[in-house]
Each structure stands twice: as C-alpha cells, then as structure tokens.
Amino acid sequence: MKTIMVDMDDVLTYGRFTDILEDYLGYKPDYEGLNSFYMQDALGDKKKDFFEKFKSKNVYEDATLLPDCYDVLKKLSKVYKIYICTDYIWREIVEYSGDSLKNKFNFLHDKLDFINPRNYVFTADKSIVNCDIKIDDKLENLFGASQKLLFTAYHNKRLSKDELAEQNVVRVNDWKEIEKLLLNDFES
Ligand SMILES: [Mg+2]
C-alpha cells in the first residue's frame, strides 16, 4: 500500500487564524502582496501585542474541514496509508506550542474518525517523513515524495505551472482534484 502524507493547515482546514487576525486588524490585509508564508507578517510592529492576545485562543474551535475533504480522504484511506503531518510550533510564542499541539490533536481526532491517531506526525521538519505521495501548501514540504501535490494557497499562487513541472510538482485546488489524481487508478 502506498503512503500519503497530508498537511493539516490550509489543506484539511483553514482553522480560524485568518478570522482572528483580521478581527484584530479591523481589515483584510493583502496576503498575496505580503510575499510570505506567514500571514502574521502582515502585522508589522503589532505582532507582539497580537500574540499576547492570541496565545490563549484555539484556532480550531468551530473550525471545519474543507469541502469534500472528509469523503475523499475516507476513500483514499481504503487504498492508501494516510499520515497527517503538521507543524504545531508558533514561531512568535514557542512556549505556547504545547497548547497548539493539543488543539490540533483534538481537531484531528474529532473530525477524522477513520484515521488512527498513531498516524499523526507533529513536526516542523517534514523532510524526515518518508511517504510516496505528499500533499501540502508549502513547496519545501513536498521534498522526498515521488508524487508531489501542491495545494493552492495565497502564498504559492505565483508559482507557475512550468516552474512546478520542473520540480515534478502538480498543483491541486480542491479535494475533488485530489480524488481525480489519486483514485482514478483504483476505479474499475
Ligand atoms: Mg499547510
């Protein structure tokens, strides 16, 4: 059975980080213009104050899975071994990362009842994960896989099809596209 590493944030769920950030700022920042993987870089010198207020919040409270994610992942789990791999460390408030880890675990356990918690991998360094297929919105995290699927996010939109093809990466925009790519071979 082939293995798939699936990222959590911005692939399975958006969490509520964006809402909390925009509520704090009082407007929606130009994320694409930021040219950064980290949305919080839009905060500039307000970062410290923001994280002081943010550290007690659970971004997964009331968060939902992305459309079709549950059904497609469940189908995939019948023919592939699924590992959910997610970074849990907040760079700005490292000492609160234990809370983040707990919130992530609870969300996964609650929403994806068919995936064994043994298959959760909590790490910021996904290069150590050896899976045949990797699905992530961060290009670097696809390293090492023989099939690499980049999930579209504001920070990777500017990567062209040709640039991605050079690195053997295919862009996916939603879970239906993942289904088409990974389940076609199994359908009779
Ligand atoms: Mg992600």
Image (spheres, grey):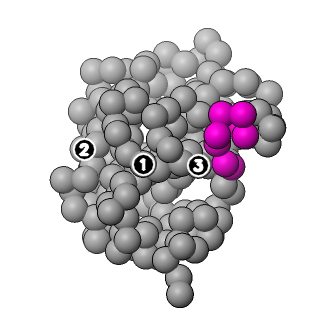
Tell me where residue 156 appears, x and y as whole percent: 70, 36
- Report the Cα–Cα distance between label 1 and label 3: 11 Å
Circles 1 and 2: CB atoms closer than 8 Å: no
Q: Give the range drawn in magenta.
A: 164-171
Q: Identify which amino acid the numbered label 2 is placed on.
A: Lys
**Vertical arrangement, residue 97 with respect to residue 11, above or below:** above
Looking at marks 1 and 3 on the same chain, the residue that comes earlier in the sequence is marked by: 1
Residue shown at the point (54%, 29%) measured from the top left: 140
Q: Which of marks 1 and 2 is nearer the N terminus?
A: 2
Q: Does the residue labelled 1 lie within 8 Å of ligand 1?
A: no
Residue nearer the viewer, 105 or 26: 105
Q: Label 2: few (<14), some or many (≥20) within 10 Å?
A: few
Q: What residue type is labelled 1?
A: Asp
| Amino acid found under the numbered disc labelled 3 | Leu
Q: Residue at x 33, y 30 (%)?
A: 128
Q: How many marks?
A: 3
The answer to if 92 sits in the magenta stretch is no
In depth, the one of 179 and 116 nearer the eye is 179
Q: Name the residue under label 2.
A: 102
Position of 72 with respect to 184 (left or right) is: left
Q: Dot 3: what SS?
A: strand
- The Cα–Cα distance between marks 2 and 3, rounded to whole angstroms, is 27 Å
> Of discs 2 and 3, which sits in the foreground?
3
Query: Residue under circle 1?
Result: 132
Q: Mark 3 points at which residue?
A: 149
